[in-house]
Image (spheres, rainbow, N blue to C red):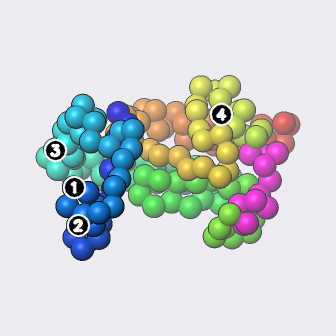
Amino acid sequence: MPLAVYGGRKDIMSCVAPVGAVYQAGTLSGNPIAVTAGIETLKILIENPEIYSQIDKNTSILEKAYKQLGLLTHRVGSLMSVFFTEKPVFNYNDVATCDTNKFAKYFDYMLKNKIYVAPSQFESMFVSVAHTDKIIEQTADIISEYDTISNKL
């Protein structure tokens, strides 16, 4: 459910209308259905904090599969990026030097195996609670098999 939200320190937020003089608007800002969905999601997360450790564990499994192929990964919790390079990646210019042809072959391989990953090295993947242990295991297996066939692509 799309939702537009932002926040900040009280002194900054007090500048925004209706209290302050700065007007802010957005297509999804304050949408009652989206806000309700967001509140209910937060309630579920508060009542089930183990969700975070489960997602972190599953992302770690995928990260390990990528690293076993010698690929560079950057990960924070459930957010992860995979890069086809041997150089460190810190910014846009570093990502721009990655092998996009190899990434395109990897993307096609994953898609042919019914795994949809971010279609660009300039994007990240997000693991969620919807990704079950079975799905994560299958995905890790498909990633691991890529090494075996990647030389043939």
Q: Which of marks 2 and 4 is in front?
A: 2
Q: Nearer the viewer, mark 3 or mark 4?
A: 3
Amino acid, disc 4? Met
- Magenta segment's dominant SS is helix
**Does residue 70 appear left or right of residue 14 in this picture?**
right
Residue 18 image label = 1
Label 3 vs 2, first from the N-terminus: 2
Q: Are marks 4 and 1 in contact (CB under 8 Å)?
A: no
Could you say where residue 28 lies in the image, as x and y percent from the top left? 36, 39
Q: Marks 3 and 2: which is nearer the front?
A: 2
Earlier sequence position, callout 3 versus callout 4: 3
Q: Give neighbour class at mark 1: few <14, some 14-19, many 20+ (Cα, 10 Å).
A: few
> Which residue in the rendered view is the most extreme toward the right?
152
The image position of residue 78, as x and y in percent, is 43, 52
Type of the residue with mark 1 = Pro
The CA distance from mark 3 to mark 4 is 34 Å
Which residue lies under the disc numbered 3?
43
Q: Is residue 23 visible?
A: yes
Mark 2, secondary structure of its residue? loop
The answer for how far apart the CA atoms under marks 1 and 3 are is: 28 Å
Counting from the top left corner in percent of width and height, residue 38 is at 25, 41
- What amino acid type should be assigned to the residue bearing mark 2? Ser
- Mark found first going from the N terminus, 2 or 4: 2
Front-most of residues 75 and 135: 75
Q: Tell which of 97 and 141 is nearer to you.
A: 97
Element type where label 3 sits in the image: helix
Circle 3 packing at 10 Å, graded few (<14), some (14-19), many (20+), is few
Q: Residue at x 21, y 46 (%)?
A: 42
First along the sequence among labels 4 and 1: 1
Identify the mark at residue 110; answer none if there is no mark.
4
Residue at image mark 2: 14
